[in-house]
Amino acid sequence: MIGRFRFDDEVFCGTVKGERVVVERGLYCDTYTLDELEILPPVNPSKIVCVGLNYIEHARELDMELPGYPMIFLKPPSAVIGHGGDIIYPPGSRHVDFEAELAVVIRKRCRNVSAMRAGDVILGYSCFNDVTARDIQQEDGQWTRAKGFDTFAPFGPFVVKAGSVDISNAYIRSRVNGQLRQDSSINNMIFDIPALVEFISYIMTLEKGDVIATGTPAGVGQLYPGDTVEIEIEGVGTLENKVVKA
Ligand code: MG
């Protein structure tokens, strides 16, 4: 697992091994413990491409028709926060939801990548929370404002390299204040990861560090100031964030 960290004023990447973080510096290695480091978002994406309605049961709970192709939208990179960062509840909304999602991190600049070649451009996986102001989403009819608030893209804690984990049947769960809210499997996706990479990369160039958020399963629900929300994906990790008043 690879993470990005801050210690004093220094920002660096390191390999996470249990509670230890190993940082290579030329010929030498430094070792830290996780609790002495600030965990930053694992990459700085130039864009976050989100997939709406990629699990059948979630489309049903929102009473929306199943799309015949991936429904995509963008979240701005300014919305990204890392593990442990605060989700700020915007004063303009009365209904903010969590959405547990698998994040796919892109390894290199690419376009027109066929599904068969998708593995070549994937660095790895992380946990993502597609925080959504549901009332604003319904009011606007398009999703930029509802999904684009600062802090509405919690992401992390680390990136698990694609070759080191098989996520095809991994569970994906969310908990609010320790209570299980979503519990599904990555294999319930309507459009799988290779199909998404193909569909998106035929539209736009993907840059190194870009993130594809692959949609949420059923069971989304509201967050309130004071809540702690966790997104857990088997073999990938647990992303935890607190909700605070603006
Ligand atoms: Mg979503």
Image (cartoon, helix red, strand yellow):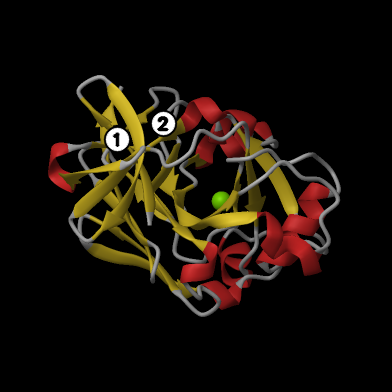
The residue beneath circle 2 is 151
Q: Are marks 1 and 2 in contact (CB under 8 Å)?
A: yes
Q: Residue at left 20%, top 37%?
A: 37
Residue 22: give x, y in percent of width and height. Answer: 26, 48
Quarter of the image with the C terminus in it: top left
Q: Residues within 10 Å of mark 1 (few under 14, many from 20)?
A: many
Q: Secondary structure at mark 2?
A: loop
The part of the image, by quadrant, that contains residue 76 is top right
Left or right of 95, for residue 176:
left
Q: Which amino acid, by three-letter code, is at mark 2? A: Thr
Q: Residues within 10 Å of mark 2 (few under 14, many from 20)?
A: many
Q: Nearer the viewer, residue 138 or 216?
A: 216
Q: Residue at left 58%, top 40%?
A: 209
Residue 212: give x, y in percent of width and height. Answer: 62, 49
The residue beneath circle 1 is 85
The part of the image, by quadrant, that contains residue 242 is top left
Q: State how far apart marks 1 and 2 are (Cα).
A: 8 Å
Q: Which amino acid, by three-letter code, is at mark 1? A: Gly
Q: Residue at left 59%, top 76%?
A: 188
Q: Secondary structure at mark 1?
A: loop
Q: Nearer the viewer, residue 191 or 71?
A: 191
